[in-house]
């Protein structure tokens, strides 16, 4: 067991879902958006699930941390609603992305939804921090067309500071995706004074270069768009005075990934 940086304790199993009647048929959904161009290929329907065992200092969705903060939804009803946009998603070469929170806190519901959509021919993507990747069977991963893997830090101490958890399960999941040949995009948030140390960037870039399944790396500049949510929730926001990284700093980090043969778009 390890403590998150807000003092809560979350074992790797993230048991906050226990006792709530979650059997895969029902889940908790925070919100949905149709037409996103930022969460996988094409234009996508994105569904944000609630529940997360990380407490990222720069999280812009802290309102998704607690499972019960979402509305209770039946998997088949959610799929029926999404399927209405099937032609739109197919025309735009898009699909559906489950995000959060951390979708794998609700593993059964997550795979019920993705499995149904995959069977309908919809491109499926999972946006995950990877910490609970061991919950996914090899069969599950065959129903996920793309994994958007959020790598928070290479350095263990930085990862612990950022998220409240150690990174080893995340790296193990990344290697497993490689070994199974499952397509992945890597996402890395660049936070001045927190994740931008040269050794941290170099270590992460070298690790990603070992992952033959990685199709692209997205370096995402830190922003303050979610700060108001922390205030509304009465949470202490540690990055109150941190500014966005400069364009030059972002370009330099992207170049570090490109120098290792990785596709890293502007």
Image: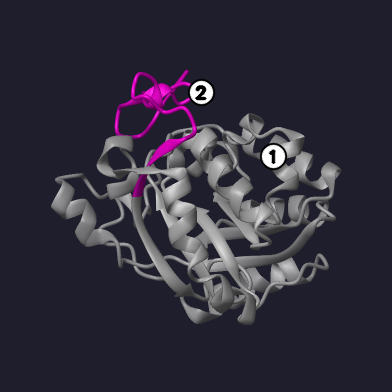
| Residue 167, horizontal then vertical, whole percent | 59, 36
Can residue 28 be found in the magenta stretch?
Answer: yes
| Residue 208, horizontal then vertical, whole percent | 75, 54
| Residue 266, horizontal then vertical, whole percent | 61, 80
Tag 1: Cα neighbours inside 10 Å, few (<14), some, or many (≥20)?
some
Determine which residue is flagged by label 2: 13
Residue drawn at x 63%, y 75% as measured from the top left: 90
Which label's residue is closer to the chain start, 1 or 2? 2
Q: Secondary structure at mark 1?
A: helix
Residue drawn at x 71%, y 32% as measured from the top left: 137
How is the protein colored in the picture?
one colour
Name the residue nearer the viewer: 176 or 42.
42
- The answer to which image quadrant residue 56 occupies is top left
Name the residue nearer the viewer: 179 or 17.
17
Name the mark on residue 140.
1
Q: Secondary structure at mark 2?
A: loop
Q: Nearer the viewer, mark 1 or mark 2?
A: 1
Dominant secondary structure of the residues highlighted in magenta in the image: loop
Name the residue nearer the viewer: 255 or 134.
134
Please report the bounds of the magenta region as a residue range: 1-29
């Amino acid at each position: 067991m390890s403590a998150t940086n807000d003092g809560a304790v979350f074992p790797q199993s993230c048991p906050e879902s226990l006792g709530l009647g979650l059997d895969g048929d029902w889940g908790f959904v925070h919100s949905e958006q149709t037409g996103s161009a930022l969460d996988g290929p094409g234009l996508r329907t994105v569904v944000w699930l609630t529940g997360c065992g990380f407490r990222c200092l720069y999280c812009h969705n802290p309102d998704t941390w607690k499972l019960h903060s979402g509305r209770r939804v039946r998997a088949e009803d959610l799929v029926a609603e999404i399927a209405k946009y099937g032609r739109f998603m197919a025309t735009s070469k898009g699909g559906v992305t489950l995000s959060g929170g951390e979708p794998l806190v609700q593993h059964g519901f997550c795979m019920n939804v993705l499995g149904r959509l995959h069977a309908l021919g919809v491109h499926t993507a999972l946006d995950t921090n990877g910490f609970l990747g061991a919950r996914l069977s090899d069969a599950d991963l065959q129903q996920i067309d793309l994994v958007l893997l959020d790598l928070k830090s290479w350095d263990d101490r930085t990862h612990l500071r950022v998220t409240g958890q150690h990174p080893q399960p995340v790296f193990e999941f990344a290697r497993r995706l490689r070994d199974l040949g499952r397509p992945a995009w890597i996402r890395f948030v660049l936070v001045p004074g927190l994740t931008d140390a040269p050794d941290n960037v170099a270590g992460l870039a070298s690790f990603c270069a070992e992952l033959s399944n990685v199709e692209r790396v997205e370096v995402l500049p830190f922003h303050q768009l979610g700060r108001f949510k922390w205030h509304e929730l009465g949470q202490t926001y540690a990055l109150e005075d941190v500014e966005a990284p400069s364009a030059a700093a972002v370009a330099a980090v992207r170049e570090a990934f490109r120098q290792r043969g990785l596709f890293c778009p502007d």
